[in-house]
Image (tube, rainbow, N blue to C red):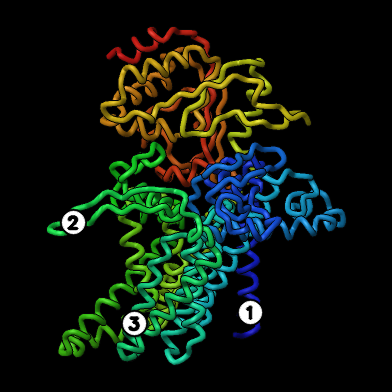
């Protein structure tokens, strides 16, 4: 690398860090991401054991994420004690977040040497005196951001190894600006860790493919696979490119089997060291019923493994075997097309997404050509003109990328549940492929390739700047909470929707902490009954609670976005929302709040209402009409609901009875 190239790499990494560390307090530490909230809650009980006698006892250990330890406590929150808990995440990110927090706690005296307004001093070094629940979240978010910056560096290294320094720099710049990565780096979750370790494993396997006689990268790749599985079980697919290495290394069957056993042993050891209670805690009995597949009957399986139970529950959810209200947004969505569309529209942006997926297609077609040429020797001569142009034979390192990326995409893209974050492990590989394609085009059409790369970088940078700008705005749920504390009478009855955030939060207003407990809360369950269970009885039960409420909070489109779009599943609930938004039920919208990616005055607005086949309430329509909006279509709920929801407060001004509301909903 030249000095200029090194300088560019440093600038790319600094830019990645800037985007990822900006807005760590995006929710004012109100813990509005429910998965992160649960992980942080569990993390408050992970402590160094008082005695090694209890350290590995599942029911007494303060290391076990599957069990609330006896005597656990944390200032400012309620912590359960001496009972099982579900934990559907890998141990490794949890332990790393806790370890980083304990390290930073030792450095707290340094906060006094820095300006109080600095994030490092106030939040990370805890100069502001945050309780453990908040401080742990702040530090763990910062660690997640740094892990993702490390993924940007690994992306450069992979691109450099496959195509050269300049394509590596271009791939790193692409990933540094990728909004999906920037957003997920703000959450204390396992996906960025999985992506980092997956990229590391692919890089090490690419090195192994190029140097098959060197065992060091092979051993490190095996360890990275074990750590990746320790972050999230989906990483087991990393064994597929490892099998490819065994085939291509010209080893005997005995040597290949020995190498594979060594890899499995190393991966298992890395997994066991970072996920000890996946092996130790067998206090969660469950049974998998017997299944008949053709002429084969698989007998029922009983186990007590808490780890396997959580993995299987997650597998049932993503496959659609368990129907949760927060996954019903995916009813009617198309496998493969929907996740790609969401990445093009929101996760990566159109230009970067097209370049990245075109690069992926370029790899797949070259792999197919190579397979066909290998099976039909006469075909090689006829394909030679094609292979000599933009279609060089697939390199060993590229083969490793394809051997993981294609099966991962086929499995993940075919899930019923299509959360955008599920695609994150692919994104570093896709941007490397996109950079490689542009580099190949540059060999014949340099100006076109430079123009494409420049436009893609510029458009993606603008989108990244627009996205990060939303963190400069207060979180809509904080604004909703402040409005209620300032305007609603004490003891007002506030209705919220189940499966959404239970607002208002306890927030500071005018320098005084206002508790949510000054209000009476009721909960409406609109998504609980589906199809034949979306009955008049369910509607009447909810309307009774609604009629007794002073305010109604619609915190996001989680409920109405599903009910309005799926009249066959929610025939009555969909009508309820249409009448509520039209003002027919005596509830008047009095406050709305939202935020979105913004370039100056222009908002990049995700659709909430048209996709749900609903008209927004008048005040919401006025709010949207008063702002210059660039409508980019529907966004996956998981992309908007945590850090950029659109919330509406309704006041009960009509005071209609449940019967009156029922009659209006039932009317033609």
Residue 536 in sight here: yes
Residue at numbered disc 3 = 394
Q: Quadrant of the C terminus?
A: top left
Gap between marks 2 and 1, in whole Å?
59 Å
- Sequence-earlier tag: 1 or 3: 1
The crowd level at tag 1 (other Cα within 10 Å; few <14, some 14-19, many 20+) is: few
Q: Nearer the viewer, mark 2 or mark 1?
A: 2
Q: Secondary structure at mark 2?
A: strand
The spot of residue 509 in percent (x, y) is 73, 29
Q: Give whichever of discs 2 and 1 has the lower sequence position.
A: 1
Residue bearing mark 1: 6
Q: Is residue 212 above or below residue 68?
A: below
x and y percentages locating residue 226 in the rendered image: 48, 69
How much space separates mark 1 and mark 3, taking CA atoms? 28 Å
Tag 2 residue: 297
Image quadrant assignment for residue 26? top right
Q: Quadrant of residue 409?
A: bottom left
Q: Classify mark 3: residues with Cα within 10 Å, few (<14), some (14-19) or many (20+).
A: many
Q: Quadrant of residue 18?
A: bottom right
Identify the disc placed on residue 528: none
Mark-to-mark CA distance, 3 and 2: 41 Å
């Amino acid at each position: 690398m030249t000095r200029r190239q090194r300088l560019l790499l440093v600038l790319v990494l600094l830019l990645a860090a800037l985007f990822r560390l900006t807005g760590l307090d995006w929710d004012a530490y109100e813990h509005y991401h429910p998965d992160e909230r649960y992980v942080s809650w569990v993390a408050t009980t992970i402590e160094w054991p008082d005695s090694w006698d209890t350290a590995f006892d599942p029911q007494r250990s303060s290391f076990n994420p599957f069990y609330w330890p006896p005597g656990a406590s944390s200032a400012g929150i309620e912590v359960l004690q001496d009972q099982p808990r579900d934990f559907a995440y890998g141990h490794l990110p949890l332990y790393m977040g806790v370890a980083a927090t304990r390290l930073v706690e030792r450095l707290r005296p340094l906060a006094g040497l820095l300006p109080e307004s600095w994030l490092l001093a106030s939040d990370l070094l805890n100069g502001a005196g945050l309780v453990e629940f908040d401080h742990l979240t702040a530090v763990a978010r910062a660690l997640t951001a740094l892990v993702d910056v490390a993924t940007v560096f690994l992306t450069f290294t992979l691109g450099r190894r496959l195509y050269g320094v300049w394509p590596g720099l271009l791939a790193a710049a692409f990933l540094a600006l990728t909004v999906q990565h920037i957003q997920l780096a703000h959450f204390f979750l396992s996906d960025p860790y999985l992506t980092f370790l997956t990229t590391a494993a692919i890089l090490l396997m690419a090195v192994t493919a190029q140097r098959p006689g060197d065992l060091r990268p092979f051993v490190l790749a095996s360890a990275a696979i074990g750590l990746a599985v320790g972050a999230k079980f989906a990483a087991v697919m990393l064994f597929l490119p490892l099998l490819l290495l065994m085939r291509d290394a010209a080893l005997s069957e005995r040597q290949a089997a020995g190498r594979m056993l060594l890899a499995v042993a190393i991966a298992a050891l890395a997994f066991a060291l970072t996920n000890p209670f996946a092996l130790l805690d067998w206090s969660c009995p469950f049974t998998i019923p017997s299944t008949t597949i053709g002429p084969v009957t698989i007998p029922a399986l009983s186990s007590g493994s808490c780890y396997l139970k959580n993995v299987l529950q997650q597998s049932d959810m993503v496959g659609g075997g368990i129907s949760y209200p927060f996954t019903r947004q995916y009813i009617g969505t198309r496998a493969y097309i929907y996740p790609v569309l969401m990445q093009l529209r929101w996760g990566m942006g159109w230009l970067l997404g097209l370049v990245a997926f075109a690069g992926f297609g370029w790899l797949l077609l070259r792999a197919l050509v190579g397979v066909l040429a290998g099976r039909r020797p006469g075909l090689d001569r006829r394909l030679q003109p094609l292979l000599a142009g933009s279609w060089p034979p697939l390199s060993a390192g590229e083969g490793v990328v394809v051997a993981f990326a294609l099966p991962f995409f086929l499995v993940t893209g075919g899930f019923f549940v299509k959360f955008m974050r599920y695609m994150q492990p692919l994104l570093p590989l896709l941007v490397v492929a996109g950079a490689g394609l542009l580099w190949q085009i540059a060999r014949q059409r340099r100006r076109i390739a430079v123009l494409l790369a420049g436009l893609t970088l510029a458009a993606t940078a603008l989108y990244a700047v627009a996205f990060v700008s939303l963190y400069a705005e207060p979180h809509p749920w904080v604004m909703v909470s402040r409005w209620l504390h300032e305007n609603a009478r004490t003891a007002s009855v506030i209705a919220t929707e189940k499966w959404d955030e239970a607002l208002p939060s306890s927030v500071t207003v005018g320098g005084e902490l206002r508790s949510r407990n000054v209000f009476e809360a009721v909960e409406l369950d609109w998504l609980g009954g589906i199809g034949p269970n979306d009955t008049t009885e369910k509607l009447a039960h909810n309307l009774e609670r609604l009629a007794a409420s002073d305010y109604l909070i619609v915190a996001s489109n989680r409920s109405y976005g599903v009910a309005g779009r799926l009249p066959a599943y929610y025939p009555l609930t969909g009508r309820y929302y249409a009448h509520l938004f039209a003002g027919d039920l005596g509830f008047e919208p009095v406050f709305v709040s939202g935020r979105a990616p913004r370039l100056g005055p222009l908002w990049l607005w995700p659709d909430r209402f048209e996709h749900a086949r609903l008209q927004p309430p008048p005040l919401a329509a006025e709010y949207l009409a008063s702002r210059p909006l660039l409508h980019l279509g529907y966004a996956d709920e998981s992309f908007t609901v945590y850090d950029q929801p659109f919330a509406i407060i309704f006041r009960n001004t009509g005071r209609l009875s449940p019967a009156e509301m029922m009659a209006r909903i039932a009317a033609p």
